[in-house]
Image (cartoon, grey):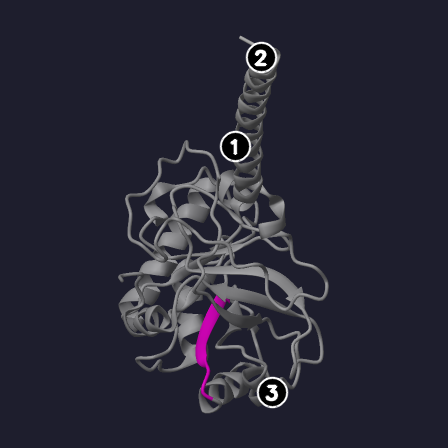
Amino acid sequence: MNALGKTKEAFHIILFFSLALLGATSCDFASQSDFRSATSPAATQPPTPQAVYPPQVANPTPSLSVELPRPSSAENMVVCPNFNTLPGIDTSGHQPNIQWSSVQKAGQVYGYVKATEGLTFANTAFLNDWSIIRTVGMARGAYHYFHASDDPVDQANFFLSAIGSMVDDDLPPALDWEVDDNAGMQANIQGALIWLDTIERATGKTPLIYTTARFFNKLGNPIEFARYPLWIAETEVICPKIPPPWRNYAIWQWSMRHVSGVKTVVDLDLFNGSNDQLDRFTHNGTLSR
């Protein structure tokens, strides 16, 4: 082979290995880019003070699906909201003179109002709020703050007398269960079950349970409550932790901020589903799809 032929051969060899190296590097860059895009935390940044609502993270579990309960011994499970969520607020009687028309115009779809607590507290603003929420076109719901140290049937009747009659498209009643009154685990569990059963029989709607993962863990995550929809409370996180026996939640209380029409800060909630699902939820009080 002459000198020119050797030079051409060397050039071809160098060119071949250069292209092979470039291809391998390009593939490596592409795979790294794909990995970053799949795992980057930028897609799920936590809420900022300027954010109106928390980020909508796709939940692989269908919203409000009915599934077998998890065992009481299971760990808490982080469950992100679905793409389809609906904003709302809940009030406790510490927010006077709420302008519900402004709340509705600010994009809130529903409002839960505290009606009673134990056997002694009745929210004096309840009846006014209860009436106006419906008038402005929002879905309305009522909740009772439970005390295990008080008789559960008396508490249920106290709540029922405060809310009066419910209409078909009212949201299911809710049990706010976040203190144990040092009454013991069994007194809490049996009392809550009696309250829930009494309310369900009286209203025809399956009540929700508002609680925190920490509180329910303290009670031993009793599996008897799996049939009741969960309203989970955990604020300023990307996705809440839910305790056994639940696998999903109906509502997430995610923050406390200012909303147009409310003079003070107020609890903000997300219904974990679409408008159609909220409509079914209000009418039959269950999470059926």
Give the label, 1 or 3, closer to the camera.
1
Dot 1 or dot 2, earlier in sequence: 2
**Residue 109 position (above or below residue 176):** below
Residue 33, picture quadrant: top right
Please report the residue visible at 58 percent of the width from the left and 51 percent of the height from the top.
43
**Residue located at (39% from left, 48% from top):** 60
Dot 2: few (<14), some (14–19), or many (≥20) neighbours within 10 Å? few
Q: Nearer the viewer, mark 2 or mark 3?
A: 2
Give the residue pinned by disc 2.
Answer: 6
Within the magenta stretch, is there residue 92? no
Disc 2 is placed on an element classified as helix
| Sequence-first tag of 1 and 3 | 1
Residue assigned mark 1: 27
Residue at 47%, 56% (x, y): give it: 81
Main SS type for the magenta part?
Answer: strand
Label number found at residue 211: none
Relative to 153, is 55 on the left or the right?
right
* Amino acid type, callout 2: Lys
Mark 1, other Cα within 10 Å: few <14 / some 14–19 / many ≥20: few
Which residue is drawn at the image coordinates 66% and 80% (left, top)? 262
Give the amino acid at mark 3: Ser
Q: Nearer the viewer, residue 279 or 286?
A: 279
Q: Which residue is mark 3?
A: 102
